[in-house]
Image (cartoon, rainbow, N blue to C red):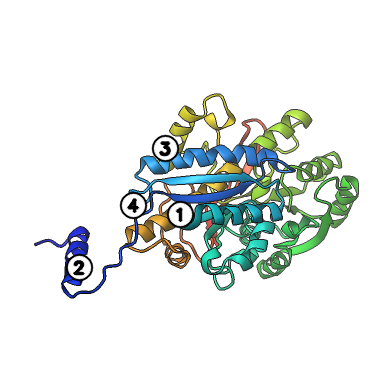
Amino acid sequence: MKQTRRTFIATGAAATAALGMPTILRAQPSEYVIGASLPLTGPFATAGQLVAPAFTLAQKLINDEGGIGGTPIRFVTEDSGYIPQNALANYQRALATEGDALVAYFGDSTGFMKLVAPELTGDQARLMGSTSFASELANPATNPYQYLAGPSYQDQFDILLQNIKDAGGSNVAFIFSNTEFGRDPIEHGKMRAEELGIEVVLEESTKPQGADIPTHVTKLAQSGAEYAILQGYVTGVWPQLIGGARQFGLPTQFMGTFWGMEKLIADRVTAEAGPFLDGYQGVMPYRYFYDREDAPRYQLFAEAAKEMFAGTPLENYMSTWTLQTMCALEIAIKALRDTVEGGKEPTPDNLAEALSGITDWDTGGFFGGPVSMIDNKIGTGRVYQYSTESGLFTPTSDWFTV
């Protein structure tokens, strides 16, 4: 007789009863819950408001696919205003309200992820993704339940520096905001540049907003940098630096990391100030949403978005911020499914084990090919270049894995 999981459980229970031993059965949950803090107000409200509908989209698609082992999933999101203490309060409230049904959480910032890290012990621990690519978080020894939905900022510098080397570049400037976000990969980048034989001719720190553009551009001109990598900016400063350099007549090739790679920002800058961003390059862990050839998962999201979000920005385009969130959710769902369908309880330790076991995973188009989770991150990306004529970022390199 073929032994199925169902018959195995039934015969096991019968044997236990015959021996007079108590049977311990865990109740099947009615649903699994993933909580989230999003900056729906505050300095990054635009990004948060674009991301929020993605949770609705993901919930529908995941449940249409049968949820997690037949159990539906529900997302619960709250506004953080991009204040780490608010996000921490949201997380604690979700723990109290949802209890064991809460299996994972999505954070809004590096600040929150570092603030909550000491809390992730015992029954307070949950699997946790976020918007962050902070290099410090990619360490299972110290942050076993936290993961990055792509390469760390250090990895992104590695990819850009390798691209500079492959293009025959000999020197580079690092321009970064005077924030933890901005400083994250700088020391690592200096070491990697030295290994590649690339001279770092300028390290320039700026304010994250309201920077003194003429002063910084003058220093860049004096450095003679062939390339400049911009780090630690989202919507402001980086376009002004490039615009100031072009007005100054500098031929420097500018490059950015993930948060400086949004098409909507580049399009708006071009419409308002002219085509000076033409040729700007940067690293992206994912395919852009319009690059969906041989990407069945993307096609599925696109079809659902067109139906669910008609008349909104998500109808025809998913921003880089939304893609990053969607990838973080897909990783959590992968770990959940592998755990539950493997016959294990979705405890934080079991989910962390499943997370570390993600190997050669075909995401259906989010990444450029099969990816693996190594040190709680996926160190893959490629370099894209912006064209003001087409309004698109298109690839200029192969996929790098670092």
Residue depicted at x 57% and y 66% = 120
**Dot 2, how many residues are within 10 Å of its Cα: few (below 14), some (14-19), or many (20+)?**
few
Q: Give how far apart the Cα atoms at labels 1 and 4 are.
A: 14 Å
Q: Is residue 287 visible?
A: yes
Marks 4,2: beta carbons within 8 A: no
C-alpha span from label 3 to label 4: 20 Å
Residue at coordinates 73% horizontally, 42% vertically from top-left? 42
Mark in front: 3 vs 1? 1
Q: Which of marks 1 and 4 is nearer the N terminus?
A: 4
Which class describes the residues within 10 Å of circle 3: few (<14), some (14-19), or many (20+)? few
- Mark with earlier residue (1, 2): 2
Q: Is mark 2 on a helix, strand or loop?
A: helix
**Three-letter amino acid code at disc 2?**
Gly
Residue 116 at x, y = what percent? 64, 62
Q: Mark 1 points at which residue?
A: 101
386 lies above or below 397:
above
Q: Which residue is drawn at 90% across and 46% down?
A: 214
Residue at 74% from the left image edge and 49% from the top image edge: 233
Is disc 1 placed on a helix, strand or loop?
A: helix
The amino acid pointed to by label 4 is: Gly
Separation of marks 3 and 2 at Cα, in angstroms:
41 Å
Q: Position of residue 117 (x, y in %)?
A: 62, 65
| Residue in front for this viewpoint, 238 or 58 | 58
**In the image, is residue 233 above or below residue 201?**
above
Foreground of the two, 236 or 27: 27
Disc on res. 12: 2
Identify which amino acid the numbered label 1 is placed on: Ala
Q: Name the residue under label 3.
A: 300
**Quadrant assignment, res 181:** bottom right
Between the C-alphas of marks 3 and 1, the distance is 27 Å
Instruction: Name the residue beneath numbered marker 4.
Output: 69
